Amino acid sequence: MLDFFTIFSKGGLVLWCFQGVSDSCTGPVNALIRSVLLQERGGNNSFTHEALTLKYKLDNQFELVFVVGFQKILTLTYVDKLIDDVHRLFRDKYRTEIQQRSALSLLNGTFDFQNDFLRLLREAEESSKIRAPTTMKKFEDSEKAKKPVRSMIETRGEKPKEKAKNSKKKGAKKESSDGPLATSKAVPAEKSGLAVGPENGVELSKEELIRRKREEFIQKHGRGLEKSSKSMKSDAPKEKGKKVPRVWALGGCANKEILDYSTPTTNGAPEDAPPEDISLIRGTGPGGQLQDLDCSSSDDEAAAQNTTKPSATKGTLGGMFGMLKGLVGSKSLSREDMESVLDKMRDHLIAKNVAADIAVQLCESVANKLEGKVMGTFSTVTSTVKQALQESLVQILQPQRRVDMLRDIMDAQRHQRPYVVTFCGVNGVGKSTNLAKISFWLLENGFSVLIAACDTFRAGAVEQLRTHTRRLSALHPPEKHGGRTMVQLFEKGYGKDAAGIAMEAIAFARNQGFDVVLVDTAGRMQDNAPLMTALAKLITVNTPDLVLFVGEALVGNEAVDQLVKFNRALADHSMAQTPRLIDGIVLTKFDTIDDKVGAAISMTYITSKPIVFVGTGQTYCDLRSLNAKAVVAALMKA
């Protein structure tokens, strides 16, 4: 039984709605629009919201969305057929009203579709009932049983024939009296005296006769063809020696410039060697402002300037036909038109470090978005698909809710409590280093920071944070802030309960008037159940304001596995009714990947969480905020 079926335009106007079991479809449909349609995640055509499963179909030609909802515990096999039939009938019946593309005409239109929908629903339910169960095929009904015995004997006889030839080449003599079966394999049917007609009880199909005649032709004329091909190969003259011989005269080279492969120098230094730019770009500007991430490089710009357009060497007529090649003239796009382009885009995304599953879903989402859309006269399929993919990637990188730490910290100050941030992630991704970078950024903005050393497992973790605290205190001494301690480390040693240390640190920060508490946790693999339980306990007991997952930009498919299992473990091992999951991502080691920035796409796609910070180096200044357009430009670069 269906809960609801609704049809609405992409502008938000509900054209028709069927209410089944549920009283209202507003909540699930709004969740579908927020989480799937607006975030360009339409690769599965299915969405789960609480106890409902929503299936949808997009009509890109008329800008319509068809959504059906039913209980996810039910297995309704006719839903796909129903949504296709409703889409086809509704589009054909109200084509005139929809083609006007105006909100007023849609509001004034009367879409009386109730009786037609009930008829289609009844037909779909009946078709699913009368569908006969599939039975296993017997051997007598298979294609192999229909083949004649003679064809199978000849097919098997080819291998001993080849072995006999190879043995003759090696010098091994093989007698021809190996038995009746061997003679029938080596000798053709005509020479062996066996008839192939119906009078012998063996009937050959048309394909078998063609194959037999082809083998006879190869046996008769094959040797002559091989000899002629060998003679043609032997007649071809082989070029020997060098194309440009060097002329030597009196023990020296007549033309010394030919042998001079060294770079021209002026006073011992190369002439055209450009000076390297080694200037340091600070990550935080005046007042502690974070700069945007820049993915462009000077090498790419120089290569773009040096490259010449191949169309300039062609003639005017060839250039005109090349420009008009691949244009689609005012017709709707189909999946066959986009298939080759999407395959290349998928391979390109995987090469840029996007997880394979995510790349497939992105291309499927773009195909659903463009299927049926009417193209312009001078628009190519490649440019249209590429533009749609770029828009989808930018939309994915832009979060549903922006994380503004400075605003949230000031709001916590008004309530006279510290703002708590917890860092988690796998081993070796750089949690402690990036915690120190964020501490420096907060100190530059005038906030006091308390660092809680809750990594009580790794040897040297407390000492590492102690060194960072000492260096940060030297950069921001109390003398510059009116005697106020701006950064301090809260530690209790090793082997203690991390959740208890975090609780004591938050209480200490509240009493001492610290603005921010940064909780460092031990690195753990996503499959380690005891450590993931301890992390869920720390987050549940202390209820931090922000949970940041620290991940590397070097990983591809592993990023998806890490984030999915961390979120699942936090949900499963939490004791709260509404468990706290990951709120944001810190992407580290971004300076080691050049333009292979696909990990950013994989992480944001799988969690719908924003990338709050990007680490680009080893100094405290190497911290950036994510620029979605710059990352997508680097990702789409060939």
Image (cartoon, rainbow, N blue to C red):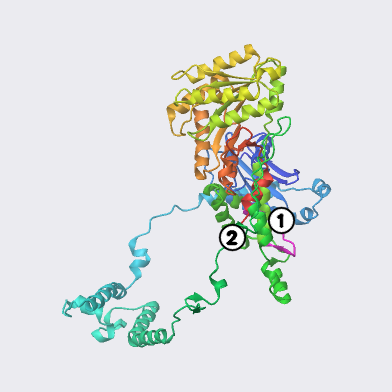
User: Do residues under tags 2 and 1 come within 8 Å of each other at their CB atoms?
Assistant: no
Residue position marked by numbered label 1 in the rendering: 61
Q: Secondary structure at mark 1?
A: loop
Q: Is residue 501 above or below residue 94?
A: above
Check the picture and name the quadrant holding the N terminus. Answer: top right
Q: Where on the picture, by quarter, is residue 432?
A: top right
Residue 369 is a magenta residue: yes
Check the picture and name the quadrant holding the C terminus. Answer: bottom right
Q: Secondary structure at mark 2?
A: helix
Q: Where on the picture, by quarter, is residue 509?
A: top right
The structure residue drawn at horizontal position 68% and vertical position 58%, both measured from the top left corner, is 384
Q: Report the mark closest to the observer, 2 or 1.
A: 2
Q: Is residue 575 visible?
A: no
Q: Say the numbered circle drawn on residue 579.
A: none
Residue position marked by numbered label 2 in the rendering: 339
Disc 2 crowd rating (10 Å Cα; few below 14, some 14-19, many 20+) is few
Q: Position of residue 431 (x, y in %)?
A: 54, 31
Identified by mark 1, the residue type is Gln
Magenta-highlighted residues = 366-381
Q: Position of residue 378 (x, y in %)?
A: 74, 64
Which of the pair 506/2 is nearer the observer? 506
